[in-house]
Structures are given as C-alpha cells and as structure tokens.
C-alpha cells in the first residue's frame, strides 16, 4: 500500500522548500504535477535538478488555458472531469506505490491540490507537506518587515467585485492581492479609492532568478502576469515606541 | 566583514524549516536567539540537535515577562532599550563574523526580529531567510484545505478591540487570530457575535510533538497559551462546482 504525498514547493527558490519536501522529492519514483497544455510547468521547473534518474512523471495538464472564461459552465464542467480523472489515476497508482504530487506555495493556501485532496478522502492515504506560501516569498523579496504589532492583514483575490476590494483595502493595515493579471485595472482603481496605491508593490516570481519588484504605481497594468502579487505593508499599529 | 543572518525557523518541526535555514543553522559559529528570562527558549529548543560543538550562543533575554502590562510606558521603555542594546551587540559581532539570529515562524510576519532589523539598517549587512509562518503549520495540523477560490482571509490579533474583531470576522471568509492567551474570552465572544464560533479551531504548537488541535467551542478559555492560534476555514467562494 502506498500513499499520495503532496509536497509543497514554496515560493520558487528550491532552497526555500522544507527539508522534508526536499527529501521526499529527491526520493520520488512517481511524480505528478500540474501544468498548462504545451508548457513545461512551473512546479516541474523548480525541481528539475532534484529528480532521480528513474523517476516516472505524470504531467496533469489543465484541459483549457484561455479559450473559456473561468466562470463559464463549460470551464467548470471540464475542470470537474479533469480533477475526477486524476483523482482516479492517483488512487490507482497509490495502491502499489507512493506518489508525490508537486504543489507551488503551500498546498492548503489557495492551491490546486485541494481539488484532488477533497476527492481522495477515504479512498487512499493523503499526506500534505506544508510550505512557504508564495506571498511570503514576495514580501521577503521587498526586504522590509510586512506586518507589525496589531496590524490586520487581509488576503484578497483580484477577481472580487471592486466595491468589496475597496472595503477590505480601507479596513485592513497590510494587504496581499493575488489573482492579479487582467484584474489589475480593477485592483489599481480600488487601491486608489482606498488611498493605498502609493504604498503598493508588485512582485513577480518572488525569490526566483527572474524576480521583479516594482512600485505598482509605476507599472503598466497591461503588463502583469496572473501570478504576480500586490503587497501593501502594515504600518499603523506598533505597540512599542519604535524607531 | 560578517553579516547578520536571520534564519526563519518555521512552525516548530525542524524538518519544516527551509533547506537554506537548515544549512545556515548547522554551520553557525555565532548564534543568537530570543528567550524569556529563566526559560530555555522555544527557538533554541527547535534547533537543539542541529548545532556545531563549538557554537557560541547569545541568548537575548526579554527584560520582563508578566510583571508589566504590554501597553504600559515602562514596558515600552524597557523593550526599546533591550532592542537597542542587542542591535549594538549584533553590529559589533558582525564586524568580524557572521551571526545567525533565530526567529520562529517567518521573520517578516509579526516577528520580534523586525525590531532589530529596523535598528540595524545602514549599520551592517542583514540577510533574512523566509520560513513557513506558524499559522500555516497550524492549518496544516487540522488537515483540511484552508482557503479556496475567492475566499478573503483576514489575520487578526486578539489584542484588537472587540467591535473591530467582530467587524473583520463578519466580512472575511477564512480567519486567523493570533495573540490569543488572556484575550481568549474576547475572541470567543466576538466569534459568537459574528456567527463563526462553531467553525473555529484552536491549534497549539502546530507541527510539534506536543501539538493540540481542538474545536474552540469545547476549550476552556482560561486554559489557552498566548501562542495558540484560532483558525476558521474559508468555505464560501468556490468558483468550481466542487464536491
């Protein structure tokens, strides 16, 4: 009897994955990972120098990229079938072997693996190895403490309605905004309305060699990948008289 | 010329620190860490089996424990002196050596190291190694995906006013509440007002051998350490038709 082990990869620098994920990935004989059709895959790229010579790879290719809207019924139906099919395949593989599934960031924090995790419950043993979330790598890339004292941190998705973004941006001290990409014009407008735009950073591929850190106000909103993260540092609530 | 390296330790299990923190700590000749007066120190306990035989240790003992209120002027003055004194000592040490400073969780996420980081700017080179925040270890200990789809996550300190806690608890999907301890009666009341108490978990020492996971509603609020974390999972915003 084997099990499914989801190894969190962290923000991108292979040295920032946990000692445990590192060991599990180096020892993996069966290795599954998500990727877009026709791409090498970011998760696979992170571990490229760590794999056994005799590793057997299972690329789990998302059935669509940009042809369908994320909120369309066709897209949802395709994704449901996709996750169900891979849950079946992983369950079958885990009857005789351990299978390692790669997951960028922390698997339980907005990770794709949770769709498999839900479906595998009661069917096979599943172990999840936590990791540094992408946002932590991104605020580390900026190089300043991110939350202090009694700061409230809110993590928001750029897909939320603009009014709701403004509401949270106004009430919280520190902000993380994920799922940016084509939502960036909305995010930027919401930050401006909330009076936070001048303090906002855009971080792309934090901790990776191609890392890019910029003030959001200086960035062309049309030139922003989906996985870039917007960050606003907490400032306001330091219980210590600091300085 | 040396530098100050702050090594994030993650949530507590030594196997969950990064490959890089692990290597840096195993190689450290000069090692500083915070601890309460008269205690061994949680950070030091995490690395106890990893240190060189010839390591030189610098316990940075907090000047007070519970004699003074955290928000009193005396406490603030003592802490300011304490951080200033250790910034001076670390700067002096780093003239000739690398000095590794241990930090539980992620150093830039509500970490004590930031008070030294601020004071050391421009005086010596400072490198910070990110780590898995304590809250990530705690939600991993519960074993279910924590945030999904378009969930809003808010991280709150138990020291906030009750009305503000209720406000954020009502508006966000997933919740993390830190600095619990003696604030637990307030936190519990706020969760009840926001209609979230039945979904709240209390996790103490997540990922460590003495880990404790319980439904908050079943816990005696008088029996809650300061570093226990309250968690409420996101549920509400799954773009996929899941199940």
Image: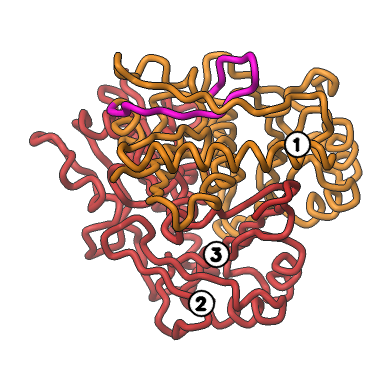
Chain colours: A red, B orange
2 vs 1, front mark: 2
Q: Where A237 falls versus B66 (above or below)?
A: below
Tell which of A146 and B62 is nearer to you: B62
Q: Where A64 falls versus B152 (above or below)?
A: below
Report how far apart the C-alphas of labels 2 and 1 lie in the structure: 37 Å
Q: Where A74 falls versus B187 (above or below)?
A: below
Task: Specify the subunit that label 1 lies on.
Answer: B
Residue visible at 31% across and 35% down in the picture: B19
To which quarter of the image does residue A130 belong?
Answer: top left
To which quarter of the image does residue B213 belong?
Answer: top right
Task: Specify the subunit that label 2 lies on.
Answer: A
Q: Tell me, yes or no, whether the highlighted magenta stretch contains residue B159.
A: no
1 vs 3, front mark: 3
Tell which of A225 and A143 is nearer to you: A143
Q: Position of residue A126 (x, y in %)?
A: 43, 28
Secondary element at image label 3: strand
Q: Quadrant of the C terminus of chain A?
A: bottom right
Which residue in the protein does label 2 denote? A216
Which residue in the protein does label 1 denote? B199
- Residues in magenta, as a range: B27-42
Q: Is the C-beta separation of discs 2 and 1 under 8 Å? A: no
Label 1 Cα neighbours within 10 Å, binned few <14 / some 14-19 / many ≥20: some
């Amino acid at each position: 009897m084997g099990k499914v082990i989801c190894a969190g990869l962290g923000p991108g620098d292979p040295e920032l994955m946990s000692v445990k994920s590192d060991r599990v990935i180096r020892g993996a004989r069966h290795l599954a990972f998500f990727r877009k059709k026709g791409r090498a895959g970011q998760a696979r790229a992170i571990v490229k120098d760590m794999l056994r010579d005799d590793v057997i790879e299972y690329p789990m290719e998302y059935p669509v990229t940009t042809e369908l809207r994320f909120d369309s019924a066709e897209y949802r139906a395709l994704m449901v079938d996709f996750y169900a099919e891979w849950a079946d395949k992983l369950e079958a593989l885990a009857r005789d072997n351990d299978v390692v599934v790669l997951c960028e960031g922390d698997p339980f924090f907005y990770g794709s693996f949770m769709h498999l995790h839900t479906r595998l419950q009661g069917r096979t043993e599943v172990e999840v190895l936590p990791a540094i979330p992408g946002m932590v790598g991104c605020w580390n890339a900026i190089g300043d403490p991110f939350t202090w004292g009694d700061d409230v941190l809110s993590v928001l998705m750029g897909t939320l309605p603009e009014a709701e973004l403004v509401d949270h941006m106004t009430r919280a001290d520190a902000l993380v905004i994920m799922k940016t990409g084509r939502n960036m014009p909305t995010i930027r407008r919401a930050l401006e309305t909330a009076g936070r735009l001048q303090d906002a950073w855009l971080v792309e591929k934090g901790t990776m060699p191609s890392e890019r850190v910029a003030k959001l106000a200086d960035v062309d909103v049309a030139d922003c990948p989906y996985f870039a993260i917007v960050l606003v540092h907490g400032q306001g609530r330091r219980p210590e008289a600091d300085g």
